[in-house]
Image: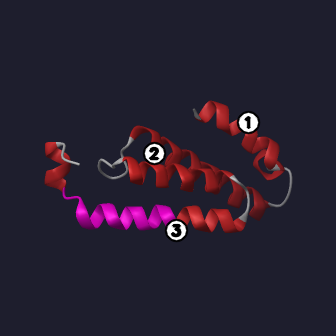
């Protein structure tokens, strides 16, 4: 799926092609990498432990926000990712992961 999404990212952001300042290039590249990671996690259903359909939909929404080059959507996507990471660390134990529990 990333192979279909990345060309659109190039179209919407010239900084991803290293056209522009260094800070813009670093920002857009980091945002794109995290967005692709979140999209993969949402599709697979694994984000530091198994996740249900609701959390998968949230991750996919956060990923789509990260794939856009705007600062507001990046912050929103990053906020959702951090909140889900903290949720997973709080409520999912290593024993649950080892036994395959949701």
Question: Can you tell which of label 1 and label 2 is closer to the viewer?
Answer: 2
Task: Look at mark 2 in the image and give the residue it sits on.
Answer: 42
Q: Residue at x 63, y 56 (%)?
A: 65
Determine if residue 18 is in view.
no
Q: Of callouts 1 and 3, which one flags the residue occurring earlier in the amino acid sequence?
A: 1
User: How many C-alpha atoms fall within 10 Å of the one at disc 1: few (<14), some, or many (≥20)?
Assistant: few
Name the magenta segment's main secondary structure.
helix
Q: Position of residue 94 (x, y in %)?
A: 18, 55
> What is the count of numbered marks?
3
Looking at the rendered structure, the secondary structure element under dot 3 is helix
Q: Residue at horizontal 45%, vertical 66%?
A: 82
**CA gap, disc 1 and disc 2:** 20 Å
Q: Is residue 54 magenta?
A: no
- Which residue in the structure is indicated by mark 3? 79
Q: Magenta span covers which residues?
A: 79-93
Residue 26 against residue 1 in the figure, above or below? below
Spatial CA distance of label 3 from label 2 is 15 Å
Q: Position of residue 87 (x, y in %)?
A: 33, 65
The answer to which image quadrant residue 45 occupies is: top left
Residue 35, image x and y in percent? 58, 50
> Looking at the picture, does residue 73 appear above or below residue 64?
below
Q: What residue is shown at x 73% (from left), y 36% (from top)? A: 7
Residue beneath disc 1: 7
21 left or right, relative to 53: right
User: Taking the image as drawn, is residue 62 in sight?
Assistant: yes
**Residue 79, horizontal then vertical, whole percent:** 52, 68
Q: Nearer the viewer, residue 27 or 13?
A: 13
On the rendered structure, is 47 left or right of 67? left
């Amino acid at each position: 799926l990333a192979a279909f999404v990345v060309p659109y990212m190039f179209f919407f952001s010239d900084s991803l092609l290293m056209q522009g300042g260094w800070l813009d290039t670093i920002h857009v590249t980091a945002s794109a990498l995290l967005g692709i990671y979140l999209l993969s996690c949402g599709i697979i259903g694994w984000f530091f432990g198994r996740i249900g359909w609701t959390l998968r939909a949230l991750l996919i929404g956060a990923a789509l926000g990260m794939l856009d080059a705007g600062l507001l959507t990046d912050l929103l996507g990053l906020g959702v990712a951090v909140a889900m990471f903290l949720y997973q660390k709080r409520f999912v134990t290593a024993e649950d992961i080892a036994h395959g529990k949701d």
